[in-house]
Amino acid sequence: FQQSMFGLIAAGLFVVCGYFAVEYYLDRAASARQLAIQQDLPDVLDQVTVCVEAGLGFDASLNRCAASNENPLGDELNRTLQDIRLGVPRSQALNSLLERTDVPDLRLFVRAVIQAEKSGIPIARVLQVQSDEVREKRRQAAEERAIKLPVMLVMPLVLCILPSLFMVIMGPAVLRMINEGAV
Protein backbone atom coordinates (compact mmCIF):
# COMPACT_ATOMS: atom_id res chain seq x y z
CA PHE A 1 0.00 0.00 0.00
CA GLN A 2 2.87 2.43 0.84
CA GLN A 3 4.62 1.78 -2.47
CA SER A 4 1.46 2.45 -4.47
CA MET A 5 0.81 5.64 -2.47
CA PHE A 6 4.43 6.75 -3.04
CA GLY A 7 4.08 5.99 -6.75
CA LEU A 8 0.83 7.97 -6.93
CA ILE A 9 2.40 10.96 -5.19
CA ALA A 10 5.50 10.76 -7.42
CA ALA A 11 3.31 10.58 -10.54
CA GLY A 12 1.30 13.58 -9.32
CA LEU A 13 4.45 15.58 -8.68
CA PHE A 14 5.80 14.59 -12.09
CA VAL A 15 2.59 15.80 -13.79
CA VAL A 16 2.59 19.10 -11.87
CA CYS A 17 6.29 19.71 -12.58
CA GLY A 18 5.76 18.85 -16.24
CA TYR A 19 2.84 21.27 -16.46
CA PHE A 20 4.83 24.12 -14.94
CA ALA A 21 7.88 23.34 -17.08
CA VAL A 22 5.82 23.51 -20.27
CA GLU A 23 4.11 26.69 -19.06
CA TYR A 24 7.50 28.27 -18.29
CA TYR A 25 8.93 27.25 -21.66
CA LEU A 26 5.94 28.64 -23.56
CA ASP A 27 6.01 31.91 -21.62
CA ARG A 28 9.71 32.32 -22.38
CA ALA A 29 9.18 31.54 -26.07
CA ALA A 30 6.28 34.00 -26.29
CA SER A 31 8.30 36.72 -24.57
CA ALA A 32 11.25 36.13 -26.89
CA ARG A 33 8.96 36.33 -29.92
CA GLN A 34 7.38 39.57 -28.70
CA LEU A 35 10.81 41.06 -28.06
CA ALA A 36 11.96 40.08 -31.55
CA ILE A 37 8.86 41.70 -33.06
CA GLN A 38 9.43 44.83 -30.95
CA GLN A 39 13.05 45.07 -32.11
CA ASP A 40 12.27 44.49 -35.79
CA LEU A 41 9.29 46.85 -35.94
CA PRO A 42 11.15 50.16 -36.59
CA ASP A 43 13.04 48.71 -39.56
CA VAL A 44 9.94 47.11 -41.04
CA LEU A 45 7.97 50.34 -40.62
CA ASP A 46 10.73 52.24 -42.39
CA GLN A 47 10.59 49.72 -45.25
CA VAL A 48 6.80 49.98 -45.50
CA THR A 49 7.01 53.79 -45.45
CA VAL A 50 9.61 53.88 -48.21
CA CYS A 51 7.59 51.45 -50.34
CA VAL A 52 4.37 53.45 -49.92
CA GLU A 53 6.15 56.72 -50.68
CA ALA A 54 7.65 55.07 -53.78
CA GLY A 55 4.14 54.40 -55.09
CA LEU A 56 3.23 50.92 -53.91
CA GLY A 57 -0.08 50.33 -52.19
CA PHE A 58 -0.20 49.52 -48.50
CA ASP A 59 -0.87 45.79 -49.02
CA ALA A 60 1.84 45.53 -51.67
CA SER A 61 4.27 47.31 -49.33
CA LEU A 62 3.44 44.89 -46.52
CA ASN A 63 3.92 41.99 -48.94
CA ARG A 64 7.32 43.27 -50.04
CA CYS A 65 8.47 43.79 -46.44
CA ALA A 66 7.15 40.42 -45.31
CA ALA A 67 9.01 38.73 -48.15
CA SER A 68 12.29 40.48 -47.33
CA ASN A 69 12.13 39.91 -43.54
CA GLU A 70 12.54 36.36 -42.32
CA ASN A 71 11.74 37.02 -38.69
CA PRO A 72 8.65 36.70 -36.47
CA LEU A 73 7.27 40.05 -37.65
CA GLY A 74 7.65 39.01 -41.28
CA ASP A 75 5.82 35.75 -40.50
CA GLU A 76 2.98 37.66 -38.85
CA LEU A 77 2.74 40.07 -41.77
CA ASN A 78 2.57 37.12 -44.17
CA ARG A 79 -0.26 35.62 -42.16
CA THR A 80 -2.10 38.96 -42.11
CA LEU A 81 -1.71 39.28 -45.87
CA GLN A 82 -3.01 35.74 -46.33
CA ASP A 83 -6.07 36.67 -44.30
CA ILE A 84 -6.62 39.73 -46.51
CA ARG A 85 -6.23 37.62 -49.67
CA LEU A 86 -8.84 35.19 -48.31
CA GLY A 87 -11.36 38.02 -48.11
CA VAL A 88 -11.03 39.16 -44.52
CA PRO A 89 -11.36 42.97 -44.28
CA ARG A 90 -8.03 44.71 -43.73
CA SER A 91 -9.04 46.17 -40.36
CA GLN A 92 -10.15 42.76 -39.10
CA ALA A 93 -6.95 41.13 -40.35
CA LEU A 94 -4.87 43.81 -38.63
CA ASN A 95 -6.84 43.34 -35.40
CA SER A 96 -6.12 39.62 -35.62
CA LEU A 97 -2.44 40.51 -35.94
CA LEU A 98 -2.73 42.43 -32.67
CA GLU A 99 -4.37 39.50 -30.91
CA ARG A 100 -1.56 37.18 -31.99
CA THR A 101 1.35 39.46 -31.11
CA ASP A 102 0.47 41.74 -28.16
CA VAL A 103 3.28 44.25 -28.82
CA PRO A 104 2.46 47.82 -27.67
CA ASP A 105 4.21 49.68 -30.51
CA LEU A 106 2.63 47.42 -33.11
CA ARG A 107 -0.74 48.10 -31.48
CA LEU A 108 -0.23 51.86 -31.90
CA PHE A 109 0.77 51.40 -35.52
CA VAL A 110 -2.22 49.20 -36.38
CA ARG A 111 -4.65 51.53 -34.61
CA ALA A 112 -3.24 54.50 -36.56
CA VAL A 113 -3.53 52.63 -39.88
CA ILE A 114 -7.12 51.57 -39.17
CA GLN A 115 -8.05 55.12 -38.12
CA ALA A 116 -6.41 56.57 -41.25
CA GLU A 117 -8.29 54.06 -43.39
CA LYS A 118 -11.62 55.00 -41.77
CA SER A 119 -11.10 58.75 -42.00
CA GLY A 120 -9.46 58.85 -45.42
CA ILE A 121 -6.12 60.29 -44.32
CA PRO A 122 -3.24 59.52 -46.71
CA ILE A 123 -1.53 56.39 -45.44
CA ALA A 124 1.96 57.62 -46.38
CA ARG A 125 1.82 60.47 -43.85
CA VAL A 126 0.54 58.16 -41.10
CA LEU A 127 3.31 55.67 -41.84
CA GLN A 128 5.93 58.43 -41.71
CA VAL A 129 4.72 59.65 -38.31
CA GLN A 130 4.48 56.12 -36.89
CA SER A 131 7.91 55.19 -38.23
CA ASP A 132 9.49 58.28 -36.65
CA GLU A 133 7.74 57.62 -33.34
CA VAL A 134 8.81 53.96 -33.12
CA ARG A 135 12.37 54.81 -34.11
CA GLU A 136 12.48 57.50 -31.40
CA LYS A 137 11.20 55.03 -28.81
CA ARG A 138 13.93 52.56 -29.78
CA ARG A 139 16.56 55.28 -29.45
CA GLN A 140 15.24 56.28 -26.01
CA ALA A 141 15.24 52.65 -24.85
CA ALA A 142 18.88 52.30 -25.97
CA GLU A 143 19.81 55.48 -24.08
CA GLU A 144 18.02 54.20 -20.99
CA ARG A 145 19.96 50.94 -21.11
CA ALA A 146 23.21 52.90 -21.54
CA ILE A 147 22.41 55.02 -18.49
CA LYS A 148 21.79 51.90 -16.37
CA LEU A 149 25.08 50.28 -17.40
CA PRO A 150 27.42 52.08 -14.94
CA VAL A 151 25.14 51.16 -12.03
CA MET A 152 25.20 47.52 -13.07
CA LEU A 153 29.00 47.56 -13.33
CA VAL A 154 29.58 48.86 -9.80
CA MET A 155 29.00 45.53 -8.04
CA PRO A 156 31.38 43.44 -10.20
CA LEU A 157 33.93 46.23 -9.93
CA VAL A 158 33.74 46.31 -6.13
CA LEU A 159 33.66 42.53 -5.68
CA CYS A 160 36.16 41.39 -8.33
CA ILE A 161 38.51 44.11 -9.49
CA LEU A 162 39.08 46.31 -6.44
CA PRO A 163 40.20 43.50 -4.07
CA SER A 164 42.80 42.27 -6.54
CA LEU A 165 43.89 45.85 -7.21
CA PHE A 166 44.37 46.46 -3.48
CA MET A 167 46.41 43.25 -3.20
CA VAL A 168 48.68 44.34 -6.05
CA ILE A 169 49.13 47.84 -4.66
CA MET A 170 49.28 47.07 -0.94
CA GLY A 171 50.90 43.62 -1.14
CA PRO A 172 54.52 44.76 -1.57
CA ALA A 173 54.18 47.38 1.17
CA VAL A 174 52.75 44.84 3.63
CA LEU A 175 55.50 42.32 2.78
CA ARG A 176 58.18 44.98 3.27
CA MET A 177 56.71 45.93 6.67
CA ILE A 178 56.61 42.27 7.73
CA ASN A 179 60.23 41.66 6.64
CA GLU A 180 61.51 44.76 8.46
CA GLY A 181 59.69 43.71 11.64
CA ALA A 182 57.48 46.75 11.85
CA VAL A 183 54.42 44.59 12.39
Image: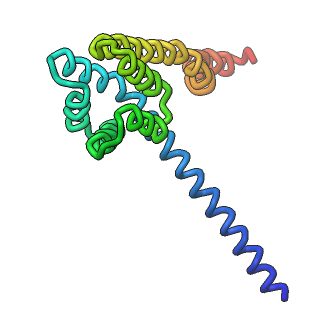
> Which quarter shows the C terminus?
top right
Q: How far across and down, in percent of the image, does residue 106 sit?
A: 43, 27
Q: Residue furthest bottom?
A: 1
Residue at (42% x, 19% y) in the render: 115
Horizontal side, residue 131 vs residue 146: left or right: left
Q: Count up the numbered dots.
A: 0
Nearest the eye: 136 or 57: 57
Which of the 4 quarters of the picture holds residue 11? bottom right
Q: How far across and down, in percent of the image, does residue 147 sit?
A: 52, 12
Q: Is residue 72 above or below residue 25?
A: above
Which of the 4 quarters of the picture holds residue 174? top right
Q: How far across and down, in percent of the image, does residue 111 sit?
A: 45, 23
Residue at (46% x, 22% y) in the render: 108
Nearest the eye: 98 or 143: 98
Which of the 4 quarters of the picture holds residue 44? top left
Q: How far across and down, in percent of the image, does residue 86 sit?
A: 29, 46
> Which quarter shows the N terminus?
bottom right
Q: Is residue 111 among what the camera can see?
A: yes
Q: Is residue 102 above or below residue 176?
A: below
Nearest the eye: 109 or 113: 113
Nearest the eye: 32 or 79: 79
Q: Residue furthest right?
A: 1
Task: Describe the colour scheme in one phrase.
Answer: rainbow
Horizontal side, residue 52 vs residue 44: left or right: left
Q: Is residue 71 among what the camera can see?
A: no
